[in-house]
Amino acid sequence: MNYRELGRTGWKVSDVSFGAWAIGGSWGQVSDEEALGALNTAIDSGVNFIDTADVYGGGRSERLIAQLKKSRKEEIIVATKAGRRLPKQTVEGYTRENLTAWIDDSLRNLETDALDLLQLHCPPTELYSRPEVFAMLDDFVKAGKIRFYGVSVEKIDEALKAIEYPNVQTVQIIFNCFRQRPAEIFFPKAKQKKVGILARVPLASGMLTGKLRRDSTFAADDHRNFNLHGNAFDVGETFSGVDYEKGLEAVEEIRALLPNSQKGTPSLAQFALRWILMFDAVTCAIPGGKRPDQVADNCAASALPPLTPEAMSSIKRIYDEKIRPLVHDRW
Ligand SMILES: NC(=O)c1ccc[n+]([C@@H]2O[C@H](COP(=O)([O-])OP(=O)(O)OC[C@H]3O[C@@H](n4cnc5c(N)ncnc54)[C@H](OP(=O)(O)O)[C@@H]3O)[C@@H](O)[C@H]2O)c1
């Protein structure tokens, strides 16, 4: 596993880290045993950074991580999120009282005295014009309840506004072979300001593993079923907002770029993750994983050699031809 500096925090985190949404909920059933198996495999593979949120399974994801931490000696940095428990996303909901309650609940779930990294969880765009919210986050740092803070954003414009606040350490954004736009404007600016970048949805909700088919089905409690049209949250979080059939076509073109290998490595998932790591502004990719085998597969991407310039330009071409018209100007 390779490690990269996380913003100005002084932490070095695994460039393939772990996204803990699926082990909380909204991805079909995952047992505690499978979830802990996935988490332990991540730590065994050198992962030292886990992304979660208070809303993932109503605190279940955070509680499983607390259980993991108790059973392991390694240092594990946990980034959680707050804001999505508001019944409706309004800037007015981001009060000191609400933030205090959300932070206190995460502290309890994670069984810790201070949150390593608190991220605002895709708040409304208007929030980025409200310095008082960021001043409150500074107060939580001073009070010792959170060590650092950052944001998770939907749109590049939000990311650009967020990094104007001097104490924003990290921006979490969708970045993968199907979402290439953040590299254009945002990455150079974030790098200049030494802001950490967490590349979320790195496998386009599993599509970039190459295992999905036209006739694949998803459980009723899996967002790839219930949020396919954005009925529950931003449609961009499901398959990166790419039309399912068109996404599958593009995946086949990417599969054709895989270097020949007798042992089936790299897998398509590893190839897609290694593509993300080609961008040095990115601190880490945070693939979700429900089972140990998926996590082991993903973590092995860290040690892959760089993609060739030909592979990089082919992935750009596939994006430009097939995916760009579907997503580029939307987020
Ligand atoms: N608003 C936000 O802040 C926000 C939104 C979304 C995600 N996130 C964060 O980003 C993380 C990653 O995004 P994501 O989980 O949405 O999507 P993702 O990482 O692109 O896809 C994860 C899913 O793909 C499948 N998978 C993973 N590795 C695999 C492998 N090697 N082979 C086959 N299948 C594999 C698994 O589901 P199946 O086995 O069921 O296919 C897994 O749950 C989340 O866990 C969360 O921490 C944050």
Image (tube, grey):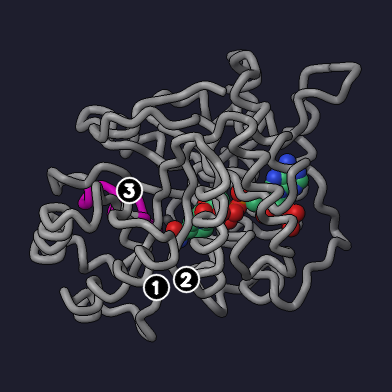
Left of 240 or right of it: where is 225? right
Residue drawn at point x = 59 percent, y = 24 percent: 302
Q: Amino acid at mark 1?
A: Arg
Q: Quadrant of the N terminus?
A: top right
Q: Is residue 155 magenta?
A: yes
Nearer the observer, 95 or 111: 111
Q: Which residue is mark 1?
A: 84
Q: Amino acid at mark 3?
A: Asp
Q: Residues within 10 Å of mark 1 (few under 14, many from 20)?
A: some
- Quarter of the image where one finds residue 239: bottom right
Q: Which residue is mark 3?
A: 116
The answer to whether any part of residue 133 appears in the image is yes
Q: Position of residue 66 (x, y in %)?
A: 50, 56
Q: Position of residue 136 (x, y in %)?
A: 12, 63
Outermost bottom residue: 87
Number of the label disc, if any, that sits on residue 55: 2
For label 3, the SS is strand
The answer to whether any part of residue 204 appears in the image is no
Magenta range: 152-162
Q: Quadrant of the C terminus?
A: bottom left
